[in-house]
Image: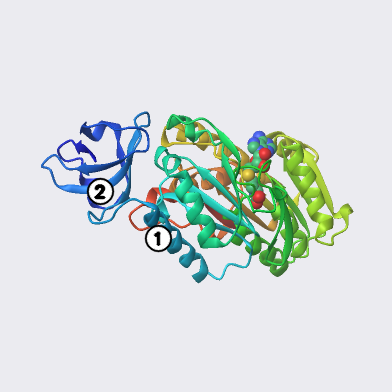
Amino acid sequence: MKTITLRDGKERSLLRRHPWVFQGSVAKGKADPGETVRVESADGRFLAWAAFSPSSQIRVRAWTFDEAERVDEAFFARRIQAALALRGQLGIDSDGVRLIHGEADGLPGLIVDRYGDLLSAQFLSAGTERFKQAIADALVAATGCQALYERSDSGVRQMEGLEPVTGWLRTPASGAPSTEVTIREHGWRLTLDVAEGHKTGYYLDQRDNRKLFADLVRQMGLKTALNCYSYTGGFSVAALAGGAEHVTSVDSSAPALARAGAHITLNGFDASRHTAMDADVNGALRQFIKEGRRFDAIILDPPKFAPSAAHADRASRAYKDINRLAFKLLEPGGLLMTYSCSGGIGAELFHKIVAGAGMDAYVDGYLIKRLEASPDHPTTINYPEGEYLKGLAIVRR
Ligand code: SAH
């Protein structure tokens, strides 16, 4: 087993059980991509068994801080079992569930979502790539799902020196099933395609927020809704389920909008209650303002504007801009649910940005709830950096 020795003082993050070691913290030692290494402090103390990644800034990702633990098939089976046990405790009202959420589940770089009987996975680190077959076997054994689709086409693989890979990783004896699947979320039917959809196919992290939106639309008696960055219209279905008369979905992806339209009728709502707009949200918001339109409820769920803290400045301006426009379009007494999924923008900074947007729009509002990802996308106490999705529910005064 190869040993990686850290520079003096650089053991601190592993000692507090944070799983990453950056390139600059390594004093000596090297290994092959994904190879399991022993990580030691400058004075030779054991710190972790970890996956080595020679081309990544994150040079080492810890598998375990227990010197006696072996990183083998049984290790992955145990970690996967523990992750499934947590999901079993959460009372999730859907058969679309994030089973493995990377670092938080002790499996750095591994994302696995379950959609009905189908698993969709991303292997995003050199370590998960190396143990892919053992992980796939353990996933099938633990879930009983025979079909596992790989969506390792995320840009972050590049930083690990890995090529994009997509396709079936495991199929039932009867052959590959359809990549299209229908899930049931809060009693709504939603379809997705694990081969064609974004990420693993769907945005499960907003599940609880979609339910909250439906509940608030009903409680507040809201009638007109605008779903910005709608993707396949999960929040649009929620709006109608909550009793809204009409919802407009705006997205720049035509296939996503086509699916959003299909979701309206699939859930028993008349197609006339939905308008799909294939447009850039920023432009659409400006157009609505020009037309003098107003909405009772607005969702702003943009893609990641700031992939890292280095992009925070430009991203802040972009967030502020769309929030300012949304405030102007919101009826008094209306509801805005606004989000950022940028890891580089913390909850406090996001609040500041939205406050600035309200100032610029001459709009004030009650902050009725702080929002976050559904609990099957957990963070851990030792890995607060994992907190990426944050949002605010605001009622305009
Ligand atoms: N709220 C959705 C997820 C949104 S993901 C849900 O609950 O499922 C972000 C979406 O923004 C993607 O569908 C992407 O196609 C869209 N998008 C990205 N940039 C955009 C832009 N400038 N204008 C409109 N849509 C955009």
Q: Which residue lies at the image location 28% right of the left edge and 56% below the top edge? A: 69
> Residue flagged by tag 1: what amino acid is it?
Arg
* 58 sits left or right of 16 in the view: right
The numbered mark, 1 or 2, whose residue comes first in the sequence reads 2
Residue pointed to by mark 1: 78
Image position, residue 7 (x, y; %): 17, 35
* 340 sits left or right of 55 in the view: right
> Residue flagged by tag 2: what amino acid is it?
Ala
Foreground of the two, 313 or 303: 303
Foreground of the two, 319 or 37: 37
Image position, residue 289 (x, y; %): 74, 40
User: What is the residue that sits farthest to the left in this orientation?
Assistant: 43
Mark 1 and mark 2: Cα distance apart in space: 17 Å
* 303 sits left or right of 70 in the view: right
Q: Regarding mark 2 in the picture, which secondary structure is present there?
A: strand
| Quadrant of residue 309 within the rendered picture | top left
Image position, residue 152 (x, y; %): 54, 39
Q: Which residue lies at the image location 25% right of the left edge and 56% below the top edge? A: 66
- Image region (quadrant) for ligand 1: top right
Q: Regarding mark 1 in the picture, which secondary structure is present there?
A: helix
Residue pointed to by mark 2: 48
